[in-house]
Image: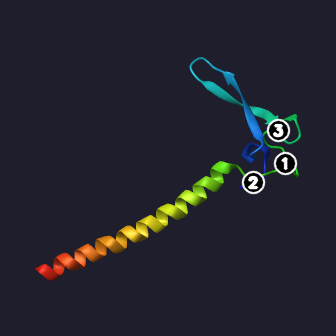
Amino acid sequence: MEKQCSNCGSFTAYYSQGFCCYLREDCGYCNNTKQIKQKTEICDKWRIRHTYLNLKRKKSVMISALKTSIKNINAISDFLEKDE
């Protein structure tokens, strides 16, 4: 992931209203520097977006839940095979 303004947690993109939807502009507002920036600019105050952190957390929780589910399904499968 590049540390551009478009990926920064402090960057809020500007949108313009189109005919049937909103179109994202090439610039936005930086809450750290209090300036309008181009989305491709890079600065020292870049910080990760919380959505990326939440996705990483959710992914690890889902993986551990899947591993537990697989163990439970295997235990049920073994139990059913013993009864045959």
Q: Nearer the viewer, mark 2 or mark 3?
A: 3
| Residue type at the position of mark 3 | Cys
**Sequence-earlier tag: 1 or 2:** 2
Residue shown at the point (81%, 50%) measured from the top left: 46
Residue labelled with disc 2: 2
Q: Using the rendered view, name the quadrant where residue 38 is placed.
A: top right
Residue 79: % across, % down: 21, 78
Q: Nearer the viewer, residue 44 or 72?
A: 72
Up the image or down, 14 lies above or below 81; here it is above
The Cα–Cα distance between marks 1 and 3, rounded to whole angstroms, is 11 Å
**Sequence-earlier tag: 2 or 3:** 2
Residue labelled with disc 1: 42
Residue shown at the point (88%, 52%) measured from the top left: 44
Q: Nearer the viewer, residue 44 or 39?
A: 44
| Residue type at the position of mark 1 | Ile
Residue shown at the point (48%, 61%) measured from the top left: 62
Residue labelled with disc 3: 30
| Residue type at the position of mark 2 | Glu
> Is residue 42 left or right of 72 when viewed as pictured?
right
> Is residue 79 left or right of 72 when viewed as pictured?
left
Residue 41: % across, % down: 84, 44
Dot 2: element: loop
Q: Using the rendered view, name the quadrant where residue 33 is placed.
A: top right
Cβ–Cβ under 8 Å for marks 1 and 2 = yes
* Count of labels in the image: 3
Quadrant in the picture for the C terminus: bottom left
Disc number placed over residue 70 in the picture, else none: none
Q: Residues within 10 Å of mark 1 (few under 14, many from 20)?
A: some
Q: Residues within 10 Å of mark 2 (few under 14, many from 20)?
A: few
